[in-house]
């Protein structure tokens, strides 16, 4: 499904990256992996949520930054969506906690979304639909995760923590106007977590070609066909980032040169933040973009599906970048921890208190 002729755009955006980092080589060394594995997937370190951080606290911080940049009254926001696969409550929405903490009106649509790593962009698509229909003036979409990984699994090298938020509203107020949105979805079981399982399972190499690459390539090609565009028409291309190498590889498959993909890559320094992954990449690019530039963003979620979104940057982006912490600032504030501290923070160690 595709749409064009939009009257909505991104009013404000925000990000959050925890201060704690663990080196990918430290994880590899802990479990006896060949340390060169970190080079093969381009992983240097990952962000780790502290003991007092979760999907809600990180999502709130990112959303607050989005509102600071937008400069809108929270009471005018009519919808709040939180995309996550690591919410703190099995039964209780995270979106209501964040909305109340931000002072958003009680008259709103509010819900949590699930679709692996693309639930955050799913929230963006829903917010766009509501704004376009006139049902709400502003819609807030948040992608936030404290990603899980079975200790000793190769996924532990990348699964990390972070959040990104986007406030969608009228095009006249936007820093970037939507030009087209497309979603390509199939039932491809490359990554899953059964009910009651503490950690997810993945299909190893199967998660690449038939899942990640197929869905992103299909979605982006659909979008470019709908809009009559080609890769050379975009100034930046941002893809879901399960590791540092996949975005560059899928970019080559679609005809995007490395210099258009690299500016949006954040994974080597913070890991795979799941629902915040591509959205953090978009935030980083927006913070250095110029009016008139066209940006492609293509999130992917296992299960499986990919979005392809095209936005056109307006001159309002220049006045709003400095109103909240940037991705570069959040990347630079870091404190390295040991594997033992990481295990404590992420509750990998069980204590018998009885």
Image: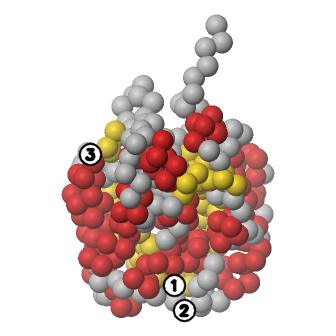
Task: Decide if residue 268 is on the left or right side of residue 317.
Answer: left
- Quarter of the image for the N terminus: give it: bottom left
Question: Disc 3 and disc 1: Cα gap in Å?
Answer: 36 Å
In the displayed image of the protein, which residue is found farthest to the top? 354
Q: Disc 2 or 1, which lies upstream in sequence?
A: 2
Question: Disc 2 and disc 1: Cα gap in Å?
Answer: 6 Å
The residue wearing badge 3 is 203
Q: Residue 189's x, y, as percent? A: 26, 45
Q: Disc 3 or 2, which lies upstream in sequence?
A: 3
Whether residues under marks 2 and 1 lie with C-beta atoms below 8 angstroms apart, the answer is: yes
Q: Disc 3 or 1, which lies upstream in sequence?
A: 3
Camera-near label (3 vs 2) is: 3
197 above or below 227? above
Task: Decide if residue 119 is on the left or right side of residue 162.
Answer: left
The residue wearing badge 2 is 292
Q: Secondary structure at mark 1?
A: strand
Residue 170 - label? none
Disc 2 residue crowd, few under 14, some 14–19, many 20+, Cα 10 Å = few
- Quarter of the image for the C terminus: give it: top right
Residue 312 - label? 1
Which is more toward the observer, 287 or 203?
A: 203
Whether residues under marks 3 and 2 lie with C-beta atoms below 8 angstroms apart, the answer is: no
């Amino acid at each position: 499904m595709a749409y064009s002729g939009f009257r909505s755009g991104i009013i404000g955006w925000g990000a959050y990256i925890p201060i704690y980092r663990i080196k990918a080589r430290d994880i590899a060394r802990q479990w006896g992996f060949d340390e060169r594995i970190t080079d093969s997937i381009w992983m240097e370190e990952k962000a780790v949520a502290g003991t007092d951080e979760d999907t809600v606290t990180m999502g709130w911080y990112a959303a607050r930054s989005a509102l600071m940049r937008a400069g809108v009254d929270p009471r005018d926001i009519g919808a709040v969506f939180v995309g996550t696969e690591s919410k703190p409550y099995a039964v209780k929405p995270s979106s209501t906690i964040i909305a109340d903490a931000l002072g958003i009106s009680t008259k709103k649509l509010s819900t949590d979304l699930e679709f692996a790593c693309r639930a955050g962009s799913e929230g963006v698509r829903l917010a766009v639909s509501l704004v376009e229909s006139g049902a709400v003036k502003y819609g807030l979409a948040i992608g936030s995760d404290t990603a899980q990984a079975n200790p000793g699994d190769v996924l532990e090298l990348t699964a990390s923590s972070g959040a990104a938020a986007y406030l969608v509203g009228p095009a006249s107020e936007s820093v970037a106007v939507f030009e087209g949105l497309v979603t390509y979805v199939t039932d491809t079981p490359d990554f899953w977590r059964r009910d009651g399982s503490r950690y997810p399972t993945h299909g190893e190499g199967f998660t690449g070609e038939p899942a990640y690459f197929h869905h992103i390539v299909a979605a982006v090609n659909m979008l470019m066909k709908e809009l009559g565009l080609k890769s050379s028409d975009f100034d930046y291309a941002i893809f879901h980032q399960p590791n540092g190498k996949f975005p560059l590889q899928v970019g080559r498959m679609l005809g995007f040169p490395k210099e258009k993909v690299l500016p949006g890559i954040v994974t080597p320094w913070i890991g795979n933040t799941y629902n915040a992954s591509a959205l953090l990449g978009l935030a980083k690019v927006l913070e250095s973009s110029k009016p008139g530039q066209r940006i492609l963003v293509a999130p992917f979620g296992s299960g499986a599906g990919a979005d392809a979104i095209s936005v056109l940057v307006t001159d309002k982006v220049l006045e709003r970048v400095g109103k909240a912490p940037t991705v570069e600032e959040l990347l630079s504030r870091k404190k390295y921890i040991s594997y033992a501290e990481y295990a404590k923070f992420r509750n990998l160690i069980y204590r018998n208190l009885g």
